[in-house]
Every structure is written in structure tokens, then in C-alpha cells.
Amino acid sequence: MEVEPPFKQYVFVEQEAARALELEKLKLQFPDKATCVTIVREDVNTYLKEWCKRTDWRACRVVMFLDPYGMQVDWSLIEAIAKTRAVDLWILFPLGVAVNRLLMRAEFPPKKWAEALTRILGTEEWRDAFYSRQVERTLFGDQEVRTKEADFSKISRYFVERLKTVFTAVANNPLPLRNSRNVPLYLLCFAAGNPRAASTALKIAQNILRP
């Protein structure tokens, strides 16, 4: 909101009533921009997918920041944003606060956890990327054993590579946001959608992301 020159429009999407009310205070805090601020109380996945479809991207460029509560952002939304080829995206990926916690050490996660991981990563290939496969002989025959190999670093690289499959350019140095015990909670990532400005946007973003 304080960036100069200013954006032409500011759209905040927040489904929870109390938080949306807090966002309304921005109009009082920045009265000169009040008419440019829109607060939308809807599910972010539903609203932004439709918004991406109806917007004329031939004459519009956007900087978007996705700050999800846990694993709210679906991969299908990220794909929809990338298809516009006009949105530069900043996203907080729930690295430690959610994803790493769902990856069990000695076996695949239970069905609901696995489905959640597939929903935010857009593929079931995480199974082979995050787990090693071994065959052990038992009294009842050969048994396949899966063991978690993914650490924070590997999960981070995997998500960056996933972003590269849909965006024009992606910063290779995402920034881990850590708690007081130095454990990564979120991963701040940048992906450029506009091909014409991707190179410049990427240089700026990578400089911002330097620890």
C-alpha cells in the first residue's frame, strides 16, 4: 500500500469475517487509496480462478501475494494464475508448518494426508520424490518398504521445480521463514508470469530473497 508509484487497484481476498473486517481498516489508513481497495469475502481458490478467467490480460498486469492458512492454496489455482502469463506471483509455501509434518518417516501418509499433498503439489509424483523404495524379505515373502528421504531442502527444491513447469521464470533462491527455534515454517517463493518482463522481475525478486 505504501509503494510509490501506487498500483491502480488493490484486491484483498479473505473468507474469514473478522480478518476481512481488519482489512477494511486499510481504507482508513490510506484514505487517498480507499476507492482503489476491494475486500472480497470468498474462498481464494474459487474466486481467483474465476477472476483469472474473466480478466482481460491483454491490458492488465498484476503482482499477487498468496499468504495461505496452512494448505489452502490448490495447485489448480497456481496453474490458473500461471496461464494468464501476466501475473508475477509471490507465494508462501507451507514447508514446515504442513507439508513436512504430513510426510511420515517409515510409510506413506494416510489417504487424507496424501490427497492433501497431491492437491497442493498437483501430482502424485511426490511419493517417489520424497520416499525411497526397498524390498525386504520376510517369512511371508518379499515386502515393499517406503522410507522418507525428503528433508526441508529437498521439499523446497521440489516445489520450485513444480513452479517451473507452469511459470515463465522462477527464483532459485526461495527464502525459508523460520520460527524462534530456527525451524522453517514457510518458504517464500517467486514466479514470473509475464514473458516480456520475466528477466527483470526475476533479478529483482532474487535480490529481495537473499538472506
Image (cartoon, grey):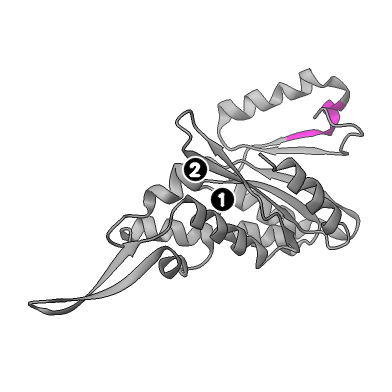
Residue to which mark 2 is pinned? 70
- Is residue 37 part of the magenta span, yes or no? yes
Q: Quadrant of the C terminus?
A: top right
The span from disc 1 to disc 2 (Cα, nearest Å) is 8 Å
Q: Quadrant of residue 167?
A: bottom right
Q: Quadrant of residue 199?
A: bottom right
Residue to which mark 1 is pinned? 73
Q: Residue at x 30, y 58 (%)?
A: 110
> Where is 17 relative to 82, above or below?
above
Q: Quadrant of the N terminus?
A: top right
- The outermost residue toward the front is 211
User: Picture coordinates of residue 132 (x, y %)?
Assistant: 36, 68
**What residue type is disc 1 on?**
Val
- Look at the numbered disc 1 and give the secondary structure of its residue: loop
Of residues 61 and 43, the one drawn nearer to the viewer in this rendering? 61
> Dot 1, crowdedness within 10 Å: few (<14), some or many (≥20)?
many
> Dot 2, crowdedness within 10 Å: few (<14), some or many (≥20)?
some
Residue 91 horizontal side relative to residue 206, left or right: left
**What residue type is disc 2 on?**
Gly
Q: Residue at x 86, y 53 (%)?
A: 200
Q: Quadrant of residue 141?
A: bottom left
**In this picture, which residue range is highlighted in magenta?**
33-38
